[in-house]
Amino acid sequence: MANSALRWFKAAIVLQILLLAYWLAIEVVELNPWNDLAARGADYDLRASIMLNALPQLAFMALFGLGIRPAATLSALGYGVYLAAQLWFWWRPVVWAADAEWPRHYGELYARTIKVPYSEGLALAPDAQHLALQALTFLTLFVTAMAASRMRYL
């Protein structure tokens, strides 16, 4: 790898680790008012959440870590799908209040968390922990894609 490609590769690895660490932190460590784990219902399944979030991220990291362009490109595509899913599941209800149940559910889970104060025109105020997660996911996607584009084919 050329020097520039190696810098992108290292930056992507660091961001991928940070993204996974951040997701794990907001998922399992009480950081109130950033998150509010106590508001979760008794039916919350941490194992399912890990399976849907952490395991794919580990798979994307493993693909990228191979250091070959096709695998790294698949990793970047995976992060793109992960970001698209986050945006779909979090912004659709915030912008359009997806259904009558969502505002109550959102209010119960995020009532004591930090939210964007200016949210006029939105159905709900977006919470800071998810804005940070989405920003970090976007940055990870961008840097991973840049690194993949600079890798050589085998």
Image: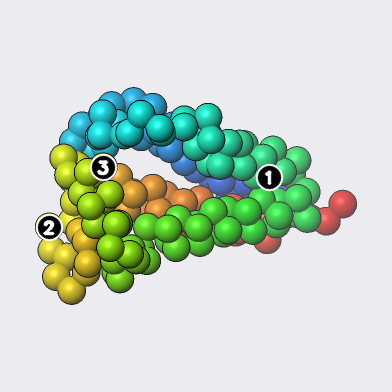
Q: Is residue 141 above or below residue 64?
A: below
Crowd rating for badge 2 (residues with CA inside 10 Å; few <14, some 14–19, many 20+): few
Q: Residue furthest right?
A: 154
* Amino acid at dot 3: Leu
Q: Position of residue 124 (x, y in %)?
A: 21, 61
Of the residues tagged 1 and 3, which is closer to the observer?
Answer: 3
The residues tagged by marks 1 and 3 sit, at their Cα atoms, a distance apart of 34 Å
Q: Is residue 103 visible?
A: yes
Report the front residue among 50 and 73.
50
**Badge 3 element:** helix
**Badge 2 element:** loop
Crowd rating for badge 3 (residues with CA inside 10 Å; few <14, some 14–19, many 20+): some
Left or right: 29 as drawn, with respect to 85: left
Identified at 18% across, 74% down, the residue is 121
Q: Is residue 72 above or below residue 17?
A: below
Q: Which residue is mark 3?
A: 109
Crowd rating for badge 1 (residues with CA inside 10 Å; few <14, some 14–19, many 20+): many
Q: Which residue is mark 1?
A: 64
